[in-house]
Image (spheres, coloured by chain):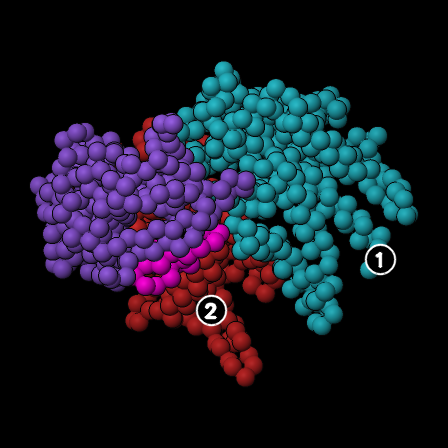
């Protein structure tokens, strides 16, 4: 078996008396979708922030592509191939859809400190950006200002920008949030195919989507991973049922 | 250099710091509660000084002049808040900076139009003239001592108000969570006007107190305003305690820097060169202090890390 | 053509035609007035690079304006008094050559912007505004208390510095120099705004998390923008000093910082030509209102307040529509 692309090894993080992450370990293997679920306040956002570089863990380390990235900035991790999408769309709203995608392609290529060549006439960047937009189905709105996109389209654009980075792994923070049933269905199908391109660590509330997509699921409760396993294992895990689904175990 | 001179200058630094606190406290409250950066705070300082000078000139009473400074600055504060500032709470900082910069222009030129360009003088009263003997044979200006004591009393009153009164609770609630005070059933609009008027009154009061040491003139407020910015950057924006610590640090650094730096350079330079280098560096000392704090604590000594 | 483009063209044409007309009817004062507007416009274009593109609300750009001014003042002062600036094992002489003075002004301003920016950009928001204002005040007090170059009184330079075979004391020839610089600077900023750097910088202003997620470091983008911005404003300072043949600590004052910001706002933030319109409008107001009343700053304040409260796009926003185009 190949080495996992992403390994989280024994991460702990406290804010004052509140322990947001307790000795969390998980990994992301090539070709899989690994879903991270847990009730609100379980510490999913804190964990994602530590993986992507927004927060530094008190203990433990994050290994990405065989390299210890615990001390690296968000930007450096992105350059190593961590493609992330945000829970609340983080896009340059004044820009067109295409400009947002070019911004991603520029991040992948490097060379931002160039002051004279018009960036929107750079064929290589435009090709990469258009290819990503085509893949998520946003080609038709390439020239539309991002602020005018529908909520669902913004979620698609988030994924497209992550694609332009040609990431080695995706980290998706609730990509289904706020999507209607149709949108969720479309995105579910899309992610299903995307995993062949790069594995996905998926934080998601929508259980139908999680059960449909995930190869493995990790359950986070009070900052702790209480179980990791396949969909069936998680469905039948009594700890999970008790802690997460709030069900009493039958005597 | 004698210890007496050093202590005397330290007291001057304390006096300066206490006045900076009155300015900084208002700025930091207004920012903490309303999220507003107010460049026109120096104008309110000037309004207080002019009101005091005018009333002292008309009545001859220094105490009435101090009351007038509080009242005039508070009224100016309420007017400005209701007419202009209120529209700026939801705007970005750039808009706030520009609108309050425009207010400076209006206040300064309006005052120049009303009072002329020549400085006014606010005489300290006879009962505060002269010097007083402190322990260890230190002779110190009675008026400056008065400033220190009054300033510290106001500071104590402010801390008491914020810690124990209803309005203080509302202010602290507003600093922590703006939506919460709405939920508590507080009239936010009135609270904002009140906080702004309070800050204005403190600034006006400081202007009147300092006006009796320096001259009362247009443009007197902005240099103090910028120093008050340095104070709250050092202390941490939004923190009253930070404003106090920052103000005293800045007051002492500035005063003692002017005394000690030229003497320090005399150790290895010619006296004339040492004086000029020392004086130039002393004029920069508080900004260097600010830069130092920024290097280690970008959000100030008592600022939240967010 | 879009309305904004039309407006830009009209503005630049007017800035060419008006001084030529003033020259034809022999009104050198009007040429000098226009020169002031053009030099202020360059300073504003400098600030707008940081403010409009990068969202950096610097209330301390007088630092760079002043440094540019003193670069000219100090170099020319030593040249006219035939004293070297540094006289040791290394001898540095003053100069009356404009290109050399420009070079020094730009480099020193850029270095200052690098240092101040590196410190100030550790913070953001209100902190950044206050800190830039405070650092500018530091330079102001330093200029006042440093006696070697006139202290509070400033430095007078008898004759404008030289450029090739031009007679720089001739208002129209000096104007030509300043106008040329404005065109060069505008061209650079226009291109830079559309370059990879401009795309990333402007994106950082719109959403920092986004640019980090695509591998850019906002701090670096801001710092580079601040350095470029400071260098342009420094160049304007050198031209301003040459225009007046005088430098004083006033160039470092907070009022100067405020005025440079007013040029940007009156014209319209984030528009390449905004500061040009703003500076022209400012000079126009100063000339017209200043003729009406000695207290014209009251009216300027009222107009500025009106623009901020009710017409946020500035002059360009009123005429060319609210949206800033990104093509």
Crowding at mark 1 (Cα within 10 Å: few <14, some 14-19, many 20+) = few
Q: Dot 2 falls on which chain?
A: C
Q: Chain B is shown in which shade?
A: cyan
Residue depicted at x 13% and y 47%: A193
Relative placement, left or right, of A129 versus B82 is left
Residue depicted at x 69% and y 32%: B155
Magenta part of the chain: A57-74
Residue C173 place in picture, x, y as percent: 29, 61
Asked if the magenta segment contains residue C287, the reply would be no
Q: Is residue A123 above or below residue B82?
A: below
Residue C254 place in picture, x, y as percent: 50, 46
Relative placement, left or right, of B62 versus C157 is right
Q: Can residue C115 be seen at all in this image of the molecule? A: yes
Mark 1 — residue? B2
Instruction: Specify the chain shown as red.
Output: C
Q: Nearer the viewer, residue C209 or B111?
A: C209
Q: Secondary structure at mark 1?
A: loop
Q: Nearer the viewer, residue C207 or B224?
A: C207
The image quarter in which residue B195 lies? top right
Residue depicted at x 52% and y 30%: B175
Q: Dot 1 falls on which chain?
A: B
Asked if the magenta segment contains residue A65, the reply would be yes
Rendered-image quadrant of the N terminus of chain B: bottom right
Extreme residue in the bottom direction: C89
Mark 2 — residue? C75
Crowding at mark 2 (Cα within 10 Å: few <14, some 14-19, many 20+) = many
Mark sitting on residue C19: none
Instruction: Specify the chain shown as purple.
Output: A
């Amino acid at each position: 078996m190949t080495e996992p692309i992403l390994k989280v090894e024994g991460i702990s993080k406290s804010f004052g008396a509140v322990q947001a992450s307790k000795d969390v370990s998980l990994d992301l293997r090539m070709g899989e979708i690994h879903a991270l679920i847990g009730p609100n306040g379980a510490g999913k956002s804190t964990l994602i922030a530590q993986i992507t570089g927004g927060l530094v863990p008190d203990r433990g380390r994050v290994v990405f592509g065989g390299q210890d990235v615990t001390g690296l900035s968000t930007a450096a991790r992105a350059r190593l191939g961590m493609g992330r999408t945000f829970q609340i769309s983080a896009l340059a709203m004044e820009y067109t859809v295409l400009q947002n995608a070019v911004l991603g392609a520029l991040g992948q290529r490097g060379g931002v400190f160039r002051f004279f060549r018009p960036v929107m006439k750079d064929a290589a960047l435009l090709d990469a950006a258009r290819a990503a937009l085509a893949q998520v189905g946003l080609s038709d709105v390439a020239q539309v200002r991002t602020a005018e996109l529908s909520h669902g389209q913004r979620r698609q654009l988030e994924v497209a920008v992550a694609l332009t980075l040609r990431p080695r792994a995706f980290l998706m923070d609730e990509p289904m949030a706020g999507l209607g049933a149709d949108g969720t269905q479309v995105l579910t199908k899309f992610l299903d195919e995307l995993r062949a391109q790069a594995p996905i660590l998926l934080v998601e509330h929508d259980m139908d989507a999680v059960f449909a997509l995930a190869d493995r699921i990790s359950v986070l409760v009070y900052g702790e991973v209480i179980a990791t396993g396949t969909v069936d294992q998680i469905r039948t895990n009594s700890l999970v049922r008790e802690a997460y689904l709030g069900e009493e175990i039958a005597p | 250099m004698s210890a007496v001179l050093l202590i005397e200058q330290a007291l001057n630094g304390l006096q300066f710091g206490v006045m900076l606190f009155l300015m900084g406290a208002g700025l930091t409250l207004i920012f903490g509660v309303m999220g507003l950066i107010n460049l026109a705070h120096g104008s309110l300082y000037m309004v207080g000084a002019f009101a005091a000078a005018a009333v002292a000139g008309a009545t001859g009473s220094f105490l009435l002049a101090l009351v007038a400074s509080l009242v005039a600055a508070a009224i100016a504060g309420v007017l400005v808040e209701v007419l202009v500032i209120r529209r700026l709470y939801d705007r970005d900082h750039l808009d706030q900076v520009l609108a309050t910069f425009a207010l400076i222009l209006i206040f300064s030129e309006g005052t120049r139009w009303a009072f002329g360009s020549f400085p006014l003088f606010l005489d300290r009263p006879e009962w505060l003239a002269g010097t007083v003997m402190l322990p260890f044979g230190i002779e110190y200006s009675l008026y400056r001592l008065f400033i220190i004591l009054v300033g510290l009393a106001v500071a104590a009153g402010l801390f008491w108000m914020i810690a124990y009164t209803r309005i203080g609770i509302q202010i602290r609630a507003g600093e922590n969570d703006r939506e919460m005070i709405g939920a508590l059933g507080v009239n936010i609009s009135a609270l904002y006007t009140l906080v702004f008027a309070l800050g204005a009154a403190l600034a006006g009061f400081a202007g009147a107190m300092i006006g009796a040491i320096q001259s009362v003139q247009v443009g007197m407020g902005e240099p103090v305003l910028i120093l008050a910015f340095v104070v709250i950057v050092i202390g941490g924006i939004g923190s009253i305690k930070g404003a106090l610590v920052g103000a005293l640090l800045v007051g002492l650094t500035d005063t003692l820097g002017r005394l000690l730096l030229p003497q320090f350079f005399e150790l290895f330079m010619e006296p004339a060169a040492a004086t000029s280098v020392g004086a130039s560096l002393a004029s920069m000392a508080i900004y260097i202090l600010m830069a130092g704090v920024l290097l280690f604590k970008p959000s100030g000594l008592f600022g939240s890390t967010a | 053509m879009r309305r904004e483009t039309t407006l830009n063209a009209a503005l630049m044409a007017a800035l060419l035609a008006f001084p030529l007309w003033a020259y034809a009817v022999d009104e050198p004062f009007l040429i000098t007035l226009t020169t002031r507007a053009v030099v202020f416009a360059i300073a504003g274009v400098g600030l707008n690079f940081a403010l409009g593109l990068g969202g950096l609300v610097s209330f301390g750009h007088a630092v760079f304006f002043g440094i540019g001014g003193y670069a000219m003042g100090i170099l020319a002062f030593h040249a006219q008094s035939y004293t070297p600036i540094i006289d040791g094992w290394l001898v540095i002489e003053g100069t009356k050559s404009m290109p050399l003075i420009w070079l020094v002004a730009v480099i020193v301003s850029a270095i200052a912007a690098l240092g101040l920016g590196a410190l100030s950009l550790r913070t953001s928001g209100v902190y950044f505004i206050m800190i830039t204002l405070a650092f500018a005040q530091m330079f102001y007090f330093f200029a006042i208390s440093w006696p070697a170059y006139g202290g509070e009184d400033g430095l007078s330079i008898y004759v404008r510095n030289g450029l090739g075979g031009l007679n720089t004391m001739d208002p129209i020839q000096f104007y030509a120099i300043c106008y040329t610089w404005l065109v060069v600077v505008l061209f650079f900023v226009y291109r830079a705004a559309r370059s990879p750097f401009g795309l990333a910088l402007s994106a950082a202003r719109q959403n920092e998390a986004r640019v980090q997620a695509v591998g850019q470091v906002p701090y670096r983008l801001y710092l580079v923008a601040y350095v470029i911005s400071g260098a342009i404003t420094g160049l304007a300072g050198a031209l301003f000093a040459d225009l007046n043949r005088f430098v004083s600590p006033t160039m470092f004052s907070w009022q100067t910082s405020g005025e440079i910001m007013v040029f940007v706002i009156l014209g319209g933030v984030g528009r390449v030509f905004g500061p040009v319109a703003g500076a022209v409008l400012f000079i126009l107001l100063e000339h017209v209102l200043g003729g009406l009343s000695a207290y014209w700053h009251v009216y300027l304040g009222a107009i500025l307040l009106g623009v901020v409260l009710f017409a946020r796009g500035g002059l360009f926003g009123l005429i060319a529509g609210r949206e800033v185009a990104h093509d």
